[in-house]
Image (cartoon, rainbow, N blue to C red):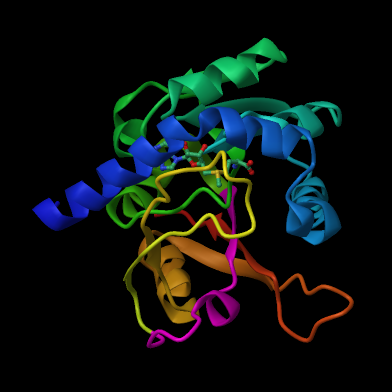
């Protein structure tokens, strides 16, 4: 990993550490309008259609998605690097591990038939580490489901190419500080990540609000192929 990438990855973790409490409140008090209106339902619908027996929630935060899926009898485990978020998740019940994505391939994990990353692939090398570890945490034929900001809508005024971007907590309360950098990927870059790590892309969804022509998010579902 280059020093510059390592610095950015560290800034991401440091930001989530600082913002764990306001983030937990924002999610639990349903303050994030785009999630309530569209993207929570979109990821749940996508995962329920897959009908997994067991699911790994990678970058689970305070655990809302594990709780929602556990209610449908899916055995969920959440992993997240931030201890305060893992503690918040455990306090509401369920199985959670504190784990950085860079270590995913190096800890014993029971392979599952589905893993999800819901707005949790933020960095460059950390995202690559999740894909590189896929055959460790997924059974062959298992699905990796990623929901992320839609590259076309998230690109803004910048050139449409992969690269680090400055973060912002625009739209969030003033309790949020120290916005994290994030690594922008074009749609072909996301597609290549799946292809290069042995996935065939089964679905590409673009959840779009009723009152807009622009997609809010991108959901990609890859199936891990043998070999
Ligand atoms: C936007 S939050 C999403 C949380 C959750 N998936 C949700 O839908 O509410 C991003 C999460 O990714 C986690 N994260 C980011 N980089 C990580 C890394 N390298 N290793 C583990 N967790 C990481 C953060 O701690 C944070 O909980």
Q: Is residue 215 above or below residue 9?
A: below
Q: Position of residue 12 (x, y in %)?
A: 36, 45
| Residue 177 shows in this picture | yes
- Screen quadrant of the C terminus: bottom left
Q: Is residue 144 left or right of residue 205?
A: left
Residue that appears at 42% across and 72% down = 185
**In the displayed image of the protein, which residue is found farthest to the left?**
3
Residue 28 position by quadrant: top right
Magenta highlight on residue 156: yes
Q: Nearer the viewer, residue 50 or 98?
A: 98
The number of callouts visible is 0
Above or below, 43 relative to 189 = above
Q: 26 and 68: which one is in front?
A: 26
Which residue: 71% across, 77% down?
215
Asked whether 93 or 46 is in front, the reply is 93
| Residue 109: percent from left, percent from top | 45, 24
Q: Would you identify the image quadrant in which residue 116 lies?
A: top right
Q: In this picture, which residue range is highlighted in magenta? A: 142-160
**Quadrant in which residue 148 is drawn:** bottom right
Kindly identify the residue that appears in the image at 44 percent across and 27 percent down.
82
User: Closest to the observer: 56 or 1?
Assistant: 1
Instruction: Say left or right for 106 vs 177.
Output: left
Is 14 inside the magenta-drawn segment? no
Image coordinates for residue 222, horizontal then vertical, percent: 57, 60
The outermost residue toward the right is 210
Answer above or below: position of 78 versus 140.
above
- When the figure is inspected, residue 215 is found, relative to residue 174, above or below; the finding is below
| The furthest residue to the front | 174
Residue 207 spot, x, y in % from top left: 76, 70
Q: Taking the image as drawn, is residue 65 in sight?
A: no
Q: Residue at x 50, y 82 (%)?
A: 156
């Amino acid at each position: 990993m280059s020093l510059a990438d390592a610095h950015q990855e560290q800034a991401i973790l440091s930001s989530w550490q600082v913002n764990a409490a306001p983030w937990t409140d924002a999610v639990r008090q349903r303050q994030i309008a785009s999630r309530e209106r569209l993207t929570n339902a979109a990821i749940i619908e996508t995962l329920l259609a897959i009908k997994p027996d067991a699911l790994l929630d990678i970058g689970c935060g305070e655990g809302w998605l594990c709780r929602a899926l556990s209610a449908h009898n899916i055995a969920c485990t959440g992993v997240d690097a931030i201890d305060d978020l893992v503690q918040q998740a455990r306090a509401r019940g369920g199985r959670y591990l504190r784990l950085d994505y860079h270590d995913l391939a190096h800890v014993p994990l029971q392979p599952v038939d589905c893993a999800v990353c819901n707005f949790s692939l933020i960095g460059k090398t950390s995202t690559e580490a999740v894909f590189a570890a896929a055959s460790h945490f997924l059974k062959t034929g298992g699905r990796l489901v990623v929901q992320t900001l839609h590259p076309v809508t998230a690109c803004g005024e910048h050139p449409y190419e992969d690269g680090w971007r400055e973060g912002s907590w625009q739209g969030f309360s003033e309790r949020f500080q120290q916005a994290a950098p994030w690594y922008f990927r074009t749609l072909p870059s996301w597609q290549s990540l799946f292809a290069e790590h042995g996935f065939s892309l089964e679905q590409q969804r673009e959840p779009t609000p009723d009152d807009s022509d622009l997609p809010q998010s991108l959901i990609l579902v890859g199936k891990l192929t043998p070999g």
